[in-house]
């Protein structure tokens, strides 16, 4: 077996050193009735390396992928460009095969990358501080609700219905076993009606969670909500799906968010059928001791040289156990390094170009739609909802687009249960070219 | 110490470059990146919300960026750099072919919401993995969704709570957790709206049956146990433990962090465990990445199967589908099906061993741990003598008489070229050193590590302990001031 270095004579000599006659003696403490026969499990036969490559290649070829088709799919996962350098950096064994940096003297690479990541995420979101990542956006949103309850010592959570249904579902699920009320505010159109959200706030409210840009891509002003949260002494939590937006439009921090959470998948991480992605968690400085998850901080070593460590560990479960701020232990460390590398390659200018191209592609598409398709109104970043006259019309279009290698959008009811089956959630990135939009529009015409 | 240690212990000062923070690079950022896309107008409505000031992401040219991160990488110790015997973390070699196959465009560049008909290949691999994990655990029903071990604990406890509620036991909210447990166990129970009661371990570090009986009652929902436990010992009373818990009307949660000792040799489900999370980043060799991403699939028996999270991967005829809703499900615990790229690497690791060789993972892991234990016992205090499983537990009791603590031993190992073992865990012994060698380490490496540990013991006994207290001196940075970091946290630049 190629990953096992021992020869049989090594094993023999080691057993002699231990003082047992056979490997079975080392398992004598497991009652014999629980021993299973070697090779008896229903698992495929061992494959040589070439066999693994063949099997995975065949499986991969059964999937259609974004490298040779046109993707207009979003809903929390986006097909942005990933520079080759990002994958190279995270493929280096020193980053890839290190554990959580518990021994900082020999983990400064991971730690400095985390510190740079935290700084850049804080700047992009306009927030004071960032942690060293969460699993992904839905669990980050749930953790934001939990944190707001700790900060305010109140228990009611108000959730806008225009937050990604998956973030809502996971948050509601996390909260459902704890005391306190969870209120979802239904939205009329494909956007966010802040008046309805504000009307739902009361004195028991710990936080209000909105998404900006919202699930339907809508961009709107949060000033009134900020004022309402101040009046009710509750926190304003802003979720986001595609962080690239904040190189173009005002950040959650500038809009007054107390906590901003979301996905960093757009920062150099491939779609990967849904994971691993990157959960982001940022907040105002004054709440830093209630943050969940790992945090990297700056310090000095005994020679006075600058260095970095994991810090604020008294919040964490290995010290606080059941009183910890979260049960989270693993983060998405390697994805932080990917995002830090991506942002370093992009800089402000590159990030702004990504955002502008993503938004320009949507504007180009929406402004040329034929009459039988309507787009949601109001300011949109790179995502919107297209509505067809009926289900059949939408399906005809999807088929026509698919035949031209276009993944034209996500049927909205696939993510948001209960909506009429005639809408498409459509997203654009800088990977969409002008010719892709022309082909998209041509497919709309032929499916009339 | 022996005369020539040049080759035996690998650490040297080497060439080490200082590298400033990205934000300290002096020059203005070049805009070197070339990007595709539509270089057109954006809508006036959107323009109304234009960001006023740039975020302040400095940016480097591509050659500078590569050098920046490569230099930083060289300050890290990884499993590819050297031995990494962190107890309870299962740091094994991460096969390079696994990295290659998950980067195939048909696996990396696919969207979770594209039509299922266009994603049958990835669904087939995941479905196969579900089956294998169920078979290995002896618990046939599997969710791949949890993103990490602690997340698996939460999902598992949700299912246990739902199963108890479904049979009307809505008062059962007490979770028994041995004092040797991972800290995530009580934290996960709290997040699931349950409270924990700590069980004091017996004199042998194992679960004390009388202590268990004394705490089992009509309010008990579950026992959370790790087997082998965090002292590296198999809970030989497992059958009786599970019987007692079930008799009391509660369920047994298995923390699968230590599954490496059992894989292919024995199955938690056969022993009476109802629910087990599997850390694929431990047992099945997906890279730790400096803290993640991980994966924490949960395998359960028939009692808990109706409550598995959604979405679930199912096979209908020859077609794989994602089941989005099930009435009895505890619901989603993640916004996607799971950490797919991580899970696919686990699939590749299991594929390489296959049915014929899977047991050799546990056999060589346990062999290696017992070999290390045997070579070090006598010079280091062994709190619970006897066979160990995949990891062995020592303490600093002998060395402390010379003023040397576990932390000093750990830091000296760094100067000798090794990553330290897990220190000060489990909490049930003073000055714990938990050593987990894993199956992918050679005898040569184990001998070098044991020699280093014995050299440290010699140094202690000779009384020449400055070299231990001052360690490490070789790496890029020496001992860091963690108190200062926590007192006035600096989490972003500039300070």
Image (tube, rainbow, N blue to C red):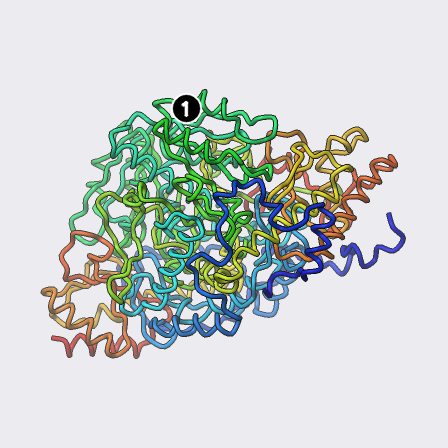
Relative height, residue B68 to residue A262 (above, below): below
Residue A204 % position (x, y): 28, 27
Label 1 crowd (10 A; few <14 / some 14-19 / many >=20) = many
The image quadrant that residue A57 belongs to is bottom left
The image quadrant that residue B488 belongs to is top right
Residue A240 % position (x, y): 35, 51
Quick one: which residue is furthest to the right in this view? B3
Q: Is residue A151 visible?
A: no
Relative height, residue B319 to residue A313 (above, below): below
Relative height, residue A275 to residue B199 (above, below): below
Residue B130 % position (x, y): 38, 56
Residue A159 % position (x, y): 27, 41
- SS at mark 1? loop
Relative height, residue A227 to residue A443 (above, below): above
Tell me: B455 left or right of B138. Answer: right
Q: In the rendered image, which quarter contains the C terminus of chain B?
A: top right
Tell me: B394 left or right of B171. Answer: right
x 52%, y 50%: residue: B265
Q: Quick one: B457 or A320, which is closer to the camera?
A: B457
Q: Which chain letter matches label 1? A: B
Q: Quick one: B174 or A348, which is closer to the camera?
A: B174
x 67%, y 32%: residue: B383
Q: Is residue A392 visible?
A: yes
- The residue wearing badge 1 is B216
């Amino acid at each position: 077996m190629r990953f096992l270095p021992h020869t049989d004579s090594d094993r023999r000599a080691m057993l002699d050193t231990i003082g047992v006659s056979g490997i079975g003696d080392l398992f004598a403490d497991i009652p014999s009735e629980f021993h299973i026969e070697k090779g008896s499990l229903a698992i495929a036969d061992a494959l040589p390396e070439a066999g693994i490559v063949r099997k995975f290649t065949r499986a991969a070829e059964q999937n259609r992928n974004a490298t040779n088709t046109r993707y207009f799919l979003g809903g929390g996962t986006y097909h942005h460009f990933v520079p080759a350098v990002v994958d190279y950096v995270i493929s280096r064994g020193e980053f890839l095969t290190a554990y959580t940096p518990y021994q900082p003297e020999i983990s400064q690479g991971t730690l400095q990358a985390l510190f740079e990541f935290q700084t850049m995420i804080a700047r992009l979101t306009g927030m004071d501080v960032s942690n060293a990542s969460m699993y992904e956006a839905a669990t980050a949103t749930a953790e934001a609700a939990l944190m707001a309850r700790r900060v305010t010592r109140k228990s009611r959570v108000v959730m806008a219905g225009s937050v990604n249904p998956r973030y809502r579902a996971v948050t509601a699920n996390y909260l459902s076993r704890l005391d306190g009320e969870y209120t979802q505010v239904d939205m009329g159109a494909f956007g966010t009606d802040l008046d309805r959200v504000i009307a739902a706030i009361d004195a028991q409210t710990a936080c209000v969670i909105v998404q900006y840009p919202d699930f339907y891509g809508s961009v709107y002003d949060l000033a009134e909500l900020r004022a309402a949260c101040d009046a009710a002494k509750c926190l304003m939590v802003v979720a986001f799906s595609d962080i690239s937006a904040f190189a173009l439009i005002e950040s959650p921090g500038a809009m007054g968010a107390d906590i901003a959470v979301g996905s960093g998948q757009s920062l150099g991480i491939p779609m990967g059928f849904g994971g691993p992605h990157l959960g982001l968690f940022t907040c105002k400085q004054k709440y830093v001791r209630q943050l969940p998850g790992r945090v990297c901080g700056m310090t000095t070593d005994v020679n006075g040289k600058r260095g970095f460590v994991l810090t604020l560990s008294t919040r964490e479960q290995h010290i606080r156990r059941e009183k910890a701020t979260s049960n989270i232990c693993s983060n998405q460390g390697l994805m932080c390094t990917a995002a830090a590398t991506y942002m370093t390659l992009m800089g402000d200018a590159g990030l702004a170009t990504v955002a502008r191209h993503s938004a320009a592609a949507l504007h180009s598409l929406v402004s040329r739609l034929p009459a039988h398709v309507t787009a949601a109104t109001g300011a949109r970043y790179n995502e919107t909802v297209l509505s067809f006259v009926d289900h059949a019309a939408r399906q005809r279009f999807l088929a026509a687009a698919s035949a031209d290698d276009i993944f034209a959008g996500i049927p909205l009811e696939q993510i948001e249960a209960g909506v009429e089956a005639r809408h498409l959630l459509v997203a654009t990135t800088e990977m969409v070219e002008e010719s892709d939009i022309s082909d998209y529009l041509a497919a709309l015409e032929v499916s009339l | 110490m022996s005369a020539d240690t040049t080759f035996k212990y690998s650490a040297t000062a080497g060439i080490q470059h200082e590298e400033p923070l990205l934000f300290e690079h002096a020059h203005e950022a070049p805009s070197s990146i070339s990007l595709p896309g539509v270089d057109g107008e954006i809508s006036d409505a959107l323009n109304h919300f234009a960001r006023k000031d740039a975020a302040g992401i400095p940016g480097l040219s591509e050659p500078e960026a590569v050098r920046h991160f490569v230099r930083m990488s060289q300050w890290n110790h990884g499993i590819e750099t050297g031995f990494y015997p962190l107890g309870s973390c299962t740091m094994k070699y991460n096969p390079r072919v696994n990295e290659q196959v998950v980067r195939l465009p048909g696996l990396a560049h696919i969207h979770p919401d594209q039509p299922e008909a266009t994603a049958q290949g990835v669904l087939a691999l995941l479905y196969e993995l579900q089956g294998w994990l169920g078979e290995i655990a002896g618990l046939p029903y599997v969710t791949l969704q949890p993103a990490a071990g602690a997340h698996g604990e939460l999902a598992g406890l949700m299912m246990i709570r739902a199963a108890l509620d479904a049979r009307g036991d809505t008062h059962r909210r007490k979770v028994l957790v041995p004092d040797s447990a991972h800290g995530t166990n009580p934290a996960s129970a709290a997040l699931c709206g349950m409270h924990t009661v700590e069980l004091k371990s017996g004199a042998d570090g194992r679960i004390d049956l009388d202590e268990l009986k004394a705490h089992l009652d009509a309010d008990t929902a579950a026992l959370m146990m790790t087997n082998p436990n965090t002292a590296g010992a198999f809970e030989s009373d497992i059958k009786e433990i599970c019987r007692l818990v079930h008799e009391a009307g509660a369920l047994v949660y298995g923390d699968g962090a230590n599954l490496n000792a059992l894989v292919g040799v024995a199955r938690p489900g056969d022993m009476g465990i109802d629910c087990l999370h599997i850390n694929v980043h431990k047992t099945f060799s997906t890279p730790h990445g400096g803290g993640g991403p991980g994966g924490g699939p949960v395998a359960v028996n028939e009692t808990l199967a109706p409550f598995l999270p959604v979405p679930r991967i199912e096979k209908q005829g020859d077609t794989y589908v994602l089941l989005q809703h099930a009435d009895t499900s505890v619901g989603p615990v993640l916004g996607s099906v799971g950490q797919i790229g991580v899970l696919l690497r686990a699939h590749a690791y299991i594929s390489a061993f296959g049915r014929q060789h899977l047991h050799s993972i546990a056999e060589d892991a346990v062999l290696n741990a017992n070999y290390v234990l045997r070579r070090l016992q006598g010079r280091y205090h062994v709190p619970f003598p006897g066979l160990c499983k995949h990891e062995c537990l020592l303490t600093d009791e002998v060395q402390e008489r010379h003023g040397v603590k576990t932390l000093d031993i750990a830091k000296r190992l760094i100067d000798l070229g090794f990553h330290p073992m897990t220190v000060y865990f489990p909490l049930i012994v003073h000055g714990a050193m938990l050593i987990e060698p894993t199956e992918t380490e050679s005898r040569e490496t184990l001998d070098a590590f044991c020699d280093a540990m014995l050299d440290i013991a010699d140094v202690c006994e000779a009384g020449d302990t400055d070299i231990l207290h001052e360690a490490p001196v070789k790496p890029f940075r020496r001992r860091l001031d963690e108190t200062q970091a926590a007192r006035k946290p600096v989490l972003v630049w500039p300070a």
